[in-house]
Image: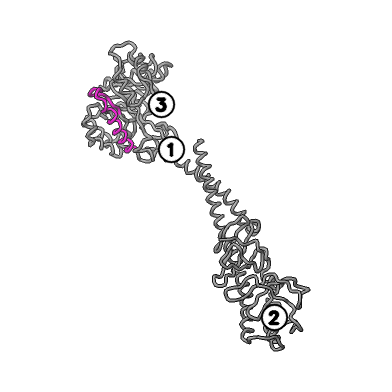
Amino acid sequence: MVKQHLLTALVATSHALLVGALFFITLWATVADEQASLLDKRSDSVARVIDEAQSIFAALGAHHFNQCGEAEVFQMRRALLTAKFIMDIGFIADGKVHCGALPGVFNAPRTSINKPDFRMADGTDVYIERKIREPLFADIYDTTLAVSRGNIGLSLHPGRLDELFEDNRRFQFYYVNGDTRSPYTLYGNPAIFHANRHGGSKLTREGLYRDQCDSHTGLCVATELSYGEIITQNRALLVLALLSVFGGGLLSAYLFNHQISARNTVAARVRRAVGSYPFFWLYQPIVDMQSQQIIGCEVLARFADRAGFLSPADFFPELKRQKLTWAFTRQMINTVLTDLNSDTNLPDGFKVSLNICPADIESGAVRELLTMTPLVTSRFNITLEITEDEFLEHSFAKEILRELAEAGFSLSIDDFGTGYSSLAHVDNLNCNYLKIDRSFVSDIETKGLKTSLIPHIVDIANKLNLQMVAEGIETEAQYQLLLDIGVQFGQGWFFGKPMTAHNFLLAAQMQPPIGWPSASAIFHAAVQPTGPAMNGRHQLQLC
């Protein structure tokens, strides 16, 4: 039971982890898709700014400005009129701004243009967070991003960029040129960049990071979602994941227990056992009542698998219900012959009693015994014990039993007095033995009604020339009474419990000389039955 609980916990935990992993993958894919969509949106926005700057550079560059006059200012204002992200356009010469689209022509150049922060591959100089003190709007925008190409300079509108990129805390627009460890942040949060993480989504200590770069320009965009944002944005999915993990674990535990329980039902255990190890056979001595010598044995079936033991009262009805009795009988015969033939000390004619189910007589399966060469040619006296059944009155059954008797098998009516038998019925079955049921024997010490019937049964058996076997003898008093009224053979705990083949063969070799006064006591001292399979007092017949 503890092992089953541990297995259940392991299965439930494994299933919960699997469900959790699946939801994590789903969450990862969902968030990654959302982030990729956001990054594509930001990339499109960056492309709009770049395209606008490129178009202005191209339009004004076509005029080949070499001075700053009214005509040049007009062209710059014309370009600025349709621009959305450009705050101002200026003409640059000798490192100074000579005029701009908004302020017009300066009387004297006023803004010094320092060295750019970097130059892109297409020759565009980039100035990051440049302070514009002079011309227009210097009192409103303290810093801005500026770019220049040739004599044309553009300052980008910070407010418009903020509107374009919305929450810039989760976004970085930067430039890399070979050294990816030190990018130039053009806009957004400079803390987002992670070195050597280009392409795809990556988990970092801060959250889920993703970037993409243009290999031609070196311009990149990156975005990062913190774990808090991921949880906040996917609360419903996370709640569903937790419920699924918990529910999946419980469901898997239930299904696992159900499957184990189904596998451990008597029907399932018996079905798996036929032809394999759970069925094993024990041997109970049959003794001559006069000499107390072992003259044979009855083969009794037992069952034990990993789930525990089953009594014959439990497993044999399932064998009959599933129509497995003959497969079981075939397995029994093969095992018994192997066990007993290994001992050459057993005498020829040693009585071996095997229980046969009436259902196998009814189906005709028992005729296979006639073709089992090891059985037919056996040196043992093979006795087939048949439980009383109304089917035995049919002519078909009588014909099969006659064939078996002619082939050399002895026949015994088992549990006589408890079933359908009549004396005429027994006389017509070519029987050799009658077995007095243990219920008659157990009544001896209490002098019950059944005990008074035993002498009559013995008398009738003698008249029909049948030998008697009393089963269930457990005490000296029972033995003595049965001996006195003429019962020839007996079996029971008084002589020996059911035991393994090894112990039985050892007992058969060690039995005392004929006439020894305490034969049964010496027998019990010689062989002690071992194992749980020998501990049950009620040795139930199979059929």
The residue under the point 65% across, 77% down is 148
Q: Which mark is residue 531?
A: 3
Name which quarter of the figure residue 418 lies in: top left
The answer to whether residue 392 shows anywhere in this view is yes
The residue singled out by tag 2 in the image is 90
- The residues bearing labels 2 and 1 have C-alpha atoms spaced at a distance of 95 Å
Q: Is residue 424 visible?
A: no
| Residue placed most toward the observer, 248 or 524 | 248
Q: Is residue 319 left or right of residue 258?
A: left
The stretch in magenta equals 325-353
* Residue located at (68% from left, 76% from top): 85
Viewer-closest of 290 and 48: 48
User: As displayed, is residue 338 above or below residue 173?
Assistant: above
Pick out the residue farthest to the front.
94
Q: Specify the farthest residue to the right.
A: 139
Q: Secondary structure beneath disc 2?
A: strand
In depth, the one of 338 and 352 nearer the eye is 338
What residue is shown with label 1?
A: 266
Q: Earlier in the sequence, mark 3 or mark 2?
A: 2
Quarter holding the C terminus is top left
Gap in angstroms between the C-alphas marked 3 and 2: 104 Å
Element type at marker 3?
loop
Q: Check residue 342 for magenta coloring.
A: yes
Q: Tell me if residue 359 is in the magenta stretch.
A: no
Q: Are marks 3 and 2 in contact (CB under 8 Å)?
A: no
Task: Judge depth for marks 2 and 1 and give the one in front.
Answer: 2
